Amino acid sequence: MSSFRIGAWCWIITGAGHTLGDIYLRNFASAADESIDAAMRAHPFDMLGLHRTYYEVTMGFSLAMGLCMVFVGVLLLYIHRLTPRQGMRTAATLGLAMSAAALAISAWLEPPPPIVLFSAACVAFGWSVRNSGRLTLEGEKVATAGRAVTAIRAGS
């Protein structure tokens, strides 16, 4: 498996873990979590014509974020599949930038699992950036050598 794909799978695992963990924690909440949930449910407000509680808005954002991380990972896998080898450096740089931003936020505000997974994604995409540059140079050398052989054959 390529390092780019490993980085993409880190996004998918982080999103799936976040979504499943969120659902699990809501269904099997500790006493402390239940009191926090009750306090958020007890505070409704109107937002753009809709009546919501803080609990509903927080859960909505949390579930949407987890699912979006899964879909970002799927899109990265799709980008990897469609991008020609010489264009992988740009795609890997994008993956690295997104992962570094997510890592910074996770290191500031989140527990260890997303920190570990986004760190792994940064390493994977960083390795992909490094290797895609190398592959492009080696590919250019091979292409240049191939053109030279063709020119020699044409002259014979």
Image: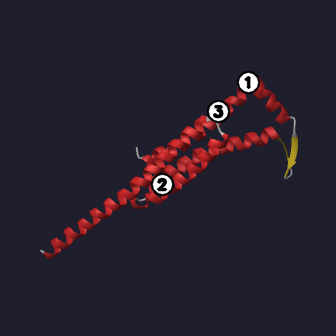
Give the image location of residue 48, x and y in percent.
84, 53
Q: Nearer the viewer, residue 55 or 113?
A: 113
The part of the image, by quadrant, that contains residue 26 is top right
* Residue highlighted by disc 2: 92
Foreground mark, 3 or 2? Answer: 2
| N-term mark: 3 or 1 | 3
Q: Nearer the viewer, residue 107 or 22?
A: 107
Kindly state the secondary structure of the residue where label 3 is placed: helix
How many neighbours does mark 3 have within 10 angstroms: few (below 14), some (14-19), or many (20 or more)? some
Kindly state the secondary structure of the residue where label 1 is placed: loop
* Residue highlighted by disc 1: 30
105 vs 143: above or below = above
Q: Which mark is residue 21?
A: 3
| N-term mark: 3 or 2 | 3
Q: Nearer the viewer, residue 131 or 45?
A: 131
Q: Amino acid at mark 3?
A: Gly
